[in-house]
């Protein structure tokens, strides 16, 4: 791949950094100008992510992997940015969610506090850096940038509930960062390197004592990543945090849990894949067991949830549990189905989070979403002719979009959630016939059933039982992002064939670790003569 294209990898990090610095200098009174600058930057990131995915989605020869050597130092000694199909696909998902969340925040949430737009850009910088970095220490740096920005965004539009949830979120993530740093130190002590590709070469050659030290380091790193991925019991913070944050921030937090899943997926195949010698498939059983427990925990929590914030939270927990269990299942056949489910569930949960704020506008202050009207269930003694009641356009929009979210999250046909779960069930039955597979199938189906019950209960209480409901006023900047996210899910269902073909190429890249290692370590520094 030409060096010019590799240099594009610095833009997803540099662009939000410079934009965030510029936004700090603009007074909060000029909120429209700050929004425009932020939105233009997010749209540029979206275009850049599409371009990078197109560049990396070439022939699977290793040349489709972009490698940028920062400061012109070759790996494993210098800072390396690496773009392949997997990282650019996640960048595209992040850019799509960022644009939708930002547009949704324009009417209200972006104005409730200071430096919202700056923190938003720094969050994107941390996300893109974590997706593109090729070594552990810089992964830690970008993780901390991402987390520091999320702390400020969580407290944005602060109230007592957000402050309490924010303090819990900060403490949990600071403890996870301590495990992260300890894991980095032990990895370097065991293998003498922090570069992903270099470590993948060294791990099969480690002595027994070094291997034990590396496994200890991997366990510490797993604590940090699994805390962010919300695996039970490390993810106890998620329901409280998601429920307390503002809707656009919650939509971005849904994405942050998937960044933890991305890192686990990347390092599991790169360091502990089939070519890792005695370390092959290290931790897979723990990931499988933890994922299944998380799936069960999320299903129970979802069944017990009453308000929309908790429903969204436990839906995200179910999604994380399913993904972690599939990684631990360690079957190549399930990879493309897992990626399809990851994208579909992330978009659907984010859409549901944004939608619930609009649904809450149906009610007057005297209404309670959770108070069932007994009159609704009373039998009619007399039949009266009725000319019918016209459904306002806003109510029709809310009802249809809620139904679409419910279908996707619960995995019912005909939308992308059904295709994702059907693909997973099909691949599980095709791969191996053991107790773990059948338990996974049972829990996945039970989770879908609890989602149907919980979402149906919420829908009934929201749209049918409120006697003083009113047609809410919706703005295009609020309805548009929800519609776009759901249209993307519908598009995935309509174009399921091409989508799965692309994701199969992403899965093949992930399994062919030797191409990744060779391309990263073979990239040479640019000589002065060639400049």
Image (cartoon, helix red, strand yellow):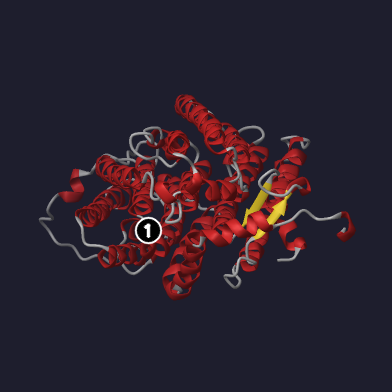
Give the residue at mark 1.
399
88 is higher (above) or lower (below) than 294: below
Q: Is residue 266 left or right of residue 28?
A: left
Question: Residue at 49% across / 50% down in the picture?
Answer: 262
Percent x, y of residue 283: 37, 44
Q: Quarter of the image containing the C terminus?
A: bottom right
Name, please, the residue furthest toward the left: 381
Residue 469 visible in rendering: no
Q: Quarter of the image containing the N terminus?
A: bottom right
Q: Is residue 489 left or right of residue 157?
A: left
How many residues crowd around disc 1 within 10 Å: few (fewer than 14), some, or many (20 or more)?
A: some
Q: Is residue 384 left or right of residue 327?
A: left
Residue 165 visible in rendering: yes
Along the line of sight, which residue is nearer the eye, 61 or 35? 61
- Place residue 236 in its image quadrant: top left
Percent x, y of residue 11: 72, 52
- Place residue 329 in its image quadrant: bottom left
Along the line of sight, which residue is nearer the eye, 181 or 468? 181
Mark 1 residue element: helix
498 is higher (above) or lower (below) than 164: below
- Place residue 529 in its image quadrant: bottom right
Along the line of sight, which residue is nearer the eye, 314 or 194? 194
Question: Residue at 22% across / 44% down in the picture?
Answer: 373
Name, please, the residue furthest toward the right: 529
């Amino acid at each position: 791949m030409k060096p010019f294209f590799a240099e594009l990898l610095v833009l997803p990090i540099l662009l939000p950094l410079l934009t965030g610095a510029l936004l700090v200098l603009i007074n909060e009174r000029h909120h429209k100008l700050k929004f425009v600058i932020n939105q233009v930057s997010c749209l540029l990131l979206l275009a850049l992510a599409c371009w990078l995915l197109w560049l990396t989605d070439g022939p699977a020869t290793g040349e489709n992997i972009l490698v940028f050597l920062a400061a012109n130092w070759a790996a494993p000694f210098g800072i390396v940015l690496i773009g392949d199909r997997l990282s650019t696909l996640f960048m595209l998902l992040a850019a799509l969610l960022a644009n939708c969340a930002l547009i949704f925040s324009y009417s209200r949430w972006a104005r409730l506090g200071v430096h919202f737009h700056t923190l938003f850009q720094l969050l994107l910088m941390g996300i893109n850096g974590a997706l593109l970095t090729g070594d552990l220490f810089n992964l830690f740096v970008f993780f901390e940038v991402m987390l520091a920005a999320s702390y400020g965004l969580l407290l944005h539009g602060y109230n007592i509930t957000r402050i309490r949830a924010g303090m819990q979120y900060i403490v949990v993530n600071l403890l996870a960062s301590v495990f992260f740093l300890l894991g980095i130190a032990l990895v370097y002590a065991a293998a003498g390197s922090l570069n992903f590709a270099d470590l993948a070469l060294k791990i099969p050659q480690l002595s027994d004592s070094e291997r034990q030290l590396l496994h200890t380091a991997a366990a510490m790193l797993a604590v940090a990543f699994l805390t962010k991925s919300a695996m039970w019991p490390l993810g106890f913070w998620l329901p409280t945090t998601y429920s307390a944050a503002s809707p656009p921030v919650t939509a971005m937090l849904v994405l942050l849990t998937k960044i933890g899943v991305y890192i686990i997926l990347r390092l599991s195949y790169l360091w502990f894949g089939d070519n890792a010698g005695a370390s092959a498939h290290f931790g897979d059983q723990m990931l499988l067991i933890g994922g299944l427990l998380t799936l069960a925990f999320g299903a129970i929590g979802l069944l017990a949830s009453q308000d929309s914030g908790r429903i969204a939270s436990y839906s995200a927990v179910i999604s994380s549990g399913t993904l972690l269990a599939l990684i631990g299942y360690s079957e190549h056949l399930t990879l493309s189905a897992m990626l399809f489910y990851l994208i579909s569930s992330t978009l659907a949960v984010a859409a549901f989070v944004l939608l619930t704020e609009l649904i809450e506008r149906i009610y007057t202050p005297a209404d309670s979403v959770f108070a069932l009207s007994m009159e609704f269930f009373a039998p009619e003694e007399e039949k009266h002719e009725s000319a019918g009641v016209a459904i306002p356009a806003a109510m029709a929009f809310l009802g249809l979009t809620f139904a679409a979210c419910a279908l996707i999250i619960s995995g019912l046909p005909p939308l992308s959630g059904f295709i994702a779960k059907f693909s997973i069930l099909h691949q599980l039955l095709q791969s191996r016939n053991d107790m773990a597979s059948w338990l996974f199938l049972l829990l996945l189906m039970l989770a879908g059933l609890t989602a149907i019950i919980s979402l149906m209960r919420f829908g009934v209480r929201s749209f049918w039982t409120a006697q003083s409901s009113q047609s809410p006023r919706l703005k295009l900047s609020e309805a548009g992002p929800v519609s776009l996210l759901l249209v993307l899910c519908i598009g995935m269902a309509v174009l399921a064939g091409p989508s799965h073909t692309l994701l199969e190429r992403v899965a093949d890249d992930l399994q062919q670790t030797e191409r990744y290692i060779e391309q990263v370590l073979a990239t040479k520094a640019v000589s002065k003569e060639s400049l």
